[in-house]
Amino acid sequence: MRRLDASAPGFRAAFDALVDDRRESDSGVSADVAAIVARVKAEGDAALADYTRRFDRFDLDASGWSISKQQCAAAYDALAPGLRAALDLAAERIRAYHAAQRPADRDYRDAAGARLGARWRAVDAAGVYVPGGRAAYPSSVLMNILPAKVAGVERIVMVTPTPDGTINPVVMAAAHIGGVDEIWRVGGAQAVAALAFGTDRIAPVDVVTGPGNAWVAEAKRQLYGLVGIDMVAGPSEIVVVADARNDPHVIAADLLSQAEHDPTSQSILFTDNNAFADAVAAAVATVIPTLATAGTMAASWDANGAIVIVPTLADAIPLCDRLAPEHLELAVDAAEADALFAKVRHAGSVFLGRQTPEAIGDYVAGPNHVLPTGRRARFSSGLSVADFMKRTSFLALDEGALAAIGPAAVALAEAEGLPAHALSVQNRLDQAKP
């Protein structure tokens, strides 16, 4: 764990190193994924079956390629009542939040008399990747499926690995709540490739979303353009800005909530109080051994954790903007949280006040927890309904509108050396003359 002091000599270079720290895939992953993608394109289902035998240790032909809607409904019915109610509450809140995101069509006439506008429509089919193994999260099922449903996507396909043939019943129950149309028991880069190219069994989709490991993220990057993607997501990260009025153990748990995802996750604390920084560091060391994910948390905190001392908490915000974190927690009084938030330019999602842990956002708050990582919040946003839709603009001119704006189009086309463009407009202008 790094400890930096903004007033110390050498801080700028040390913080630059923290900002520039790359925790994502290397060239070896890129080459591996390129080979997998090429094989799935060439061999289709045969490649999927072979990779599943090798990586997930079970036979698709013997155990079944898909999970039925009936199996998902049975898994939902079999849940403990408390867990079923929690999933239902999460779905209700996620659905309601995303329903308010639906973009509106536009249709208007401007001062020149031209009719202009745009129409939004959902993509025909969306593919959702749901991890297995270490990261089998039903919350991610809801976060990816429900925005697609709200958008109006007609066919939603889920791919998920089932290592050793084991199917996660809570993931199946979440798929039932979300209303998935198809579930295929394949994972990894090969599953993303199958969604993009299509195989004999799996019809291709238009958009692929959902979290995954470095191979999944790299497959999405390589296949973008053939299909749309939500983002290329890397290891999880959290930045907490906290004053000394917080309980150190509470802040320690907030930092560890992301550290437990993966050894490459990152947790950073900004505070203006040295004694509080010491107390949080001690609390982290105390809490880690008490939790089942201790090994992952310890590796993450030791390699990627940081505590940064700043003169005032307001001084932390420009530094946070440079990090552009996936999650930013402002653990201060409500009024100060709002004042700090007003200055934030780059963050995937912000959690305001002492009683708003980031972990709430992972489950039941409503906003999407699929967020940009690796400083990508500088230019991108979390998953939304718009990721499953596309906008088609339209234009309608009558003779008056064409006469008003057409000559300028002719002049610009001629300036660009495109005479057919100019002629296309000029012909209509000439026809309209008395």
Image (cartoon, rainbow, N blue to C red):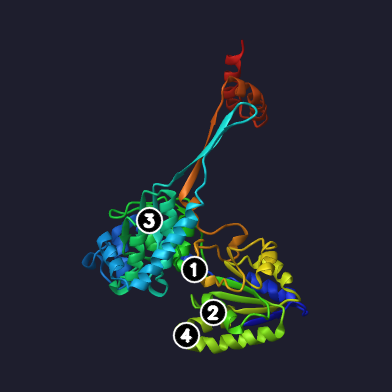
Q: Nearest to the eye among marks 1 and 2: give it.
A: 1
Do residues under tags 2 and 4 come within 8 Å of each other at their CB atoms? Answer: yes
Q: Can you see residue 34?
A: no
Q: Which three-letter amino acid code belongs to the residue tagged 4?
A: Leu
Q: Nearest to the eye among marks 3 and 2: give it.
A: 2
- Say which residue label 4 marks: 291
The CA span between labels 3 and 4 is 37 Å
Q: Earlier in the sequence, mark 3 or mark 2?
A: 3
**Label 1, residues with CA under 10 Å away: few <14, some 14-19, many ≥20:** some
Q: Which mark is residue 70?
A: none
- In which quadrant is the C terminus drawn? top right
- In which quadrant is the N terminus drawn? bottom right
Q: Which three-letter amino acid code belongs to the residue tagged 2?
A: Leu
- Say which residue label 1 marks: 362
The front one of 357 and 27 is 357
Q: Earlier in the sequence, mark 1 or mark 2?
A: 2
- Say which residue label 3 marks: 195
Task: Please tell me which residue is depicted at 65% across the width and 23% down the height of the picture.
Answer: 404
Task: Please tell me which residue is depicted at 29% across the width and 59% down the height of the picture.
Answer: 45
Residue 11 in the image: x percent, y percent?
A: 74, 76
Q: Earlier in the sequence, mark 4 or mark 1?
A: 4
**Label 2, residues with CA under 10 Å away: few <14, some 14-19, many ≥20:** many
Q: Quadrant of residue 20?
A: bottom right
The CA span between labels 1 and 2 is 14 Å
The CA span between labels 3 and 2 is 34 Å
Q: Quadrant of residue 144?
A: bottom left
Q: Quadrant of residue 162?
A: bottom left
The CA span between labels 4 and 1 is 19 Å
Q: Which mark is residue 256?
A: 2
Q: Is 271 drawn above or below residue 335 in the view shown?
A: below
